[in-house]
Image: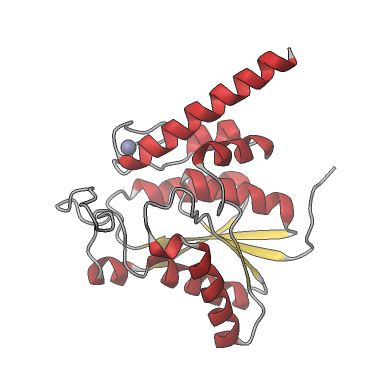
Amino acid sequence: MSKRVSNEKAVVVFSGGQDSTTCLFWALERYREVEAVTFNYGQRHKLELACAADIAAELGVRHYVLDMSLLGQLAPNALTRSDIAIEQKEGELPSTFVDGRNLLFLSFAAILAKQIGARHVVTGVCETDFSGYPDCRDVFIKSLNVTLNLSMDYNFVIETPLMWLNKAETWALADELGAFDFVRNKTLTCYNGVVADGCGECPACKLRCNGLEEFVAGRAAAEGEAG
Ligand code: ZN
């Protein structure tokens, strides 16, 4: 039986990574119609865009790619520039943080959503493993939601299914959605551009792999008890 709870339409902010792909499956189960939007902001790894396009095509989701290359030019960062190391200095935000990214992405996603008659904008931001990114905080999302509603006189609902989950719980959600193998094998989270389990060395891979191990161990223990 379908668990669909809404007869409405949603736009998913989609990068082709673990989190946003899990959100895409979450939205597909929940909404009558789902479309996805990916932002090209000059990522080092063009594979990220190809990955997102492939996943959307495989799931039969209409996919928009919007050019945000200006963001990469305005705010140089380790995701767009190979000469900037991926690091976090004491008391500073990680070099992978991009000023204004979620503000702009969610604003553009909302503009698109209104044009196509969608109210729900789904994003994989998460405060639990947020690495200190200010624009992943729940308070920022709620504030932006109010601003977007006022700016366009429209009742947007920004949905953040991962907001309070850790990485192991995000894997568990993918599993609940029947998408564990898909997410594990087809998504790209790695800062070094390696699909699936990734390079294993970069901060994104470490977070993803630790969560995966924790989830798999928990599942095995639960099966042991049940069996
Ligand atoms: Zn990696």
Q: Is residue 208 visible?
A: yes
- Toward the left, the furthest residue is 83
**Where does the image place residue 136, in percent across and percent down from the top left?**
45, 60
Please indicate whether residue 189 sits to the left or right of residue 191 in the image. right
Please indicate whether residue 10 sits to the left or right of residue 103 in the image. right
**Where does the image place residue 22, in percent across and percent down from the top left?**
57, 45
Can you tell me which quadrant of the image ligand 1 is in?
Answer: top left
**Where does the image place residue 140, in percent across and percent down from the top left?**
48, 69
**Where does the image place residue 1, in percent across and percent down from the top left?**
85, 42
User: Residue drawn 40% across and 38% down?
Assistant: 207
Q: How is the image coloured?
A: secondary structure
- Toward the front, the furthest residue is 91
User: Residue drawn 29% across and 54% down?
Assistant: 96
Q: Is residue 57 visible?
A: no
Q: Nearer the viewer, residue 158 or 226?
A: 226
User: Residue drawn 23% across and 48% down?
Assistant: 86
Q: Quadrant of the C terminus?
A: top right
Q: Is residue 147 above or below residue 7?
A: below
